[in-house]
């Protein structure tokens, strides 16, 4: 349940309706905030970061539904995150399989085409959907990632995830989130960090723990801060005919200004926005981002 401060700032934060489907002998979860009535607008599909889950988008979805009650918002729990089943072999935690899981989920929901919002890992998943089923993609929002990911930033994410510990109370979990995020998110405050703590953790055996399969971190074992990661420019160019909005946190260590400039050079119609006072990755429910994103998705759309 949202705190009074959260409710005052964001309105009631609805958790959405959880639906499940099957792929690869796994039960996978997707969260749906259904729009009111029949709308001609494409649903907004939200794809979370590496270890994040669909609850990460609850406040954002509530904001979107407040601004446009007709719009449906959908968010996925990748395999091994949130309410989706884990896998036995860590090699099955890869963006290609996650993209196929998302496409299977869209099939389950009867969605032929959607506007996609990817946060961090979600941006990589969008690149793979552009390979497997480009016809399913409407407009695209990249939240603080692109075809080039900075290895040093990814190594830093791995290191703090590996150091994460269970917490006895929500206050202690919120303290940990605040210590982690506050240096690169000076524009945010305690309610934001508490909301993030709720999204990131689940109660197990009397403690709050990170809501993902620990085996997921093994996929980052080979990451070295000084060794560049493979780049995805060839996949990015598959989105050349799509409208794209790129959000970059001012203090991001994953998406550099130089990468955004190169994205703009290769995709002349691309729009970009720096989110002041935030790092990796901007909180989509803050800084007027819901309104900005809706304006972008609806720009020049048929009435």
Image (cartoon, grey):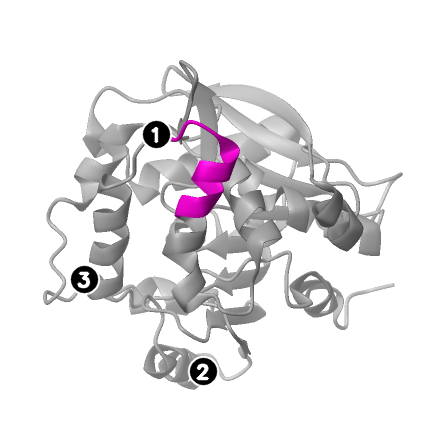
Q: In this figure, which residue is indicated by the disc labeled 1?
A: 166
Q: Earlier in the sequence, mark 3 or mark 2?
A: 3
Q: In this figure, which residue is indicated by the disc labeled 2?
A: 264
Q: In this figure, which residue is indicated by the disc labeled 3?
A: 229
Q: Secondary structure at mark 2?
A: helix
Q: Position of residue 202 (x, y in %)?
A: 47, 26
Nearer the observer, disc 3 or disc 2?
A: 3
Query: Would you place residue 23 above or below residue 129 in this image?
Result: above
* Quarter of the N terminus within the rendering: top right
Q: Quadrant of residue 229?
A: bottom left
- Tags 1 and 3 touching, CB below 8 Å: no
Identify the residue at image location x=38%, y=81%.
Answer: 257
Q: Secondary structure at mark 1?
A: loop
Which stretch did the figure color magenta? 167-176
Instruction: Depth check: give the residue in front, 99 or 48.
Output: 48
Dot 3, how many residues are within 10 Å of its Cα: few (below 14), some (14-19), or many (20+)?
some
Identify the residue at image location x=10%, y=65%.
Answer: 227
Q: Position of residue 200 (x, y in %)?
A: 46, 38
Query: Would you place residue 103 above or below residue 234 in this image?
Result: above
Nearer the observer, disc 1 or disc 3?
A: 1
How far apart are the alpha carbons under marks 1 and 3? 31 Å
Dot 1, how many residues are within 10 Å of its Cα: few (below 14), some (14-19), or many (20+)?
some
How far apart are the alpha carbons under marks 3 and 2? 21 Å
Is 229 left, or right, of 270 in this rendering? left
| Residue 172 belongs to magenta span | yes
Instruction: Depth check: give the residue in front, 100 or 55.
Output: 55
* Quarter of the C terminus within the rendering: bottom right
Please name the predominant secondary structure of the magenta segment in the image.
helix
């Amino acid at each position: 349940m949202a705190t009074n401060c959260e409710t005052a700032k964001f309105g009631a934060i609805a958790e959405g309706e959880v639906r499940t489907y099957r792929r690869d002998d796994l039960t996978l979860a997707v969260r749906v905030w259904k729009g009111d009535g029949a709308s001609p607008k494409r649903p907004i599909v939200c794809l979370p970061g590496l270890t994040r889950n669909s609850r990460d988008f609850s406040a954002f979805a509530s904001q979107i539904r407040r601004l446009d009650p007709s719009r449906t918002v959908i968010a996925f729990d990748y395999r091994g995150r949130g309410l989706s089943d884990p896998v036995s072999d860590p090699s099955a935690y890869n963006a290609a399989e996650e993209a196929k899981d998302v496409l299977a989920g869209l099939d389950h929901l009867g969605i032929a085409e959607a506007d996609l919002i990817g946060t961090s890992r979600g941006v990589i998943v969008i690149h793979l959907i552009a390979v497997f089923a480009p016809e399913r993609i409407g407009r695209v929002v990249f939240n603080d990632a692109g075809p080039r990911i900075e290895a040093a930033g990814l190594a830093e994410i791995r290191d703090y995830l590996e150091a994460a510990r269970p917490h006895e109370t929500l206050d202690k979990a919120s303290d940990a989130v605040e210590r982690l995020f506050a240096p690169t998110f000076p524009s945010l405050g305690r309610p934001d960090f508490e909301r993030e703590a709720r999204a990131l953790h689940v109660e197990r055996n009397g403690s709050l723990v990170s809501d993902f399969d620990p085996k997921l971190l093994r996929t980052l074992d080979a990451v070295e801060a000084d060794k560049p990661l493979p780049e995805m420019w060839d996949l990015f160019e598959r989105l050349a005919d799509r409208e794209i909005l790129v959000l970059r946190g001012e203090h991001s260590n994953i998406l550099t200004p130089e990468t955004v400039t190169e994205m703009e050079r290769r995709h002349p119609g691309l729009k970009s926005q720096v989110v002041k006072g935030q790092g990796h990755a901007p909180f989509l429910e803050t800084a007027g981002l819901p309104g900005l994103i809706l304006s972008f998705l609806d720009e020049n759309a048929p009435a």
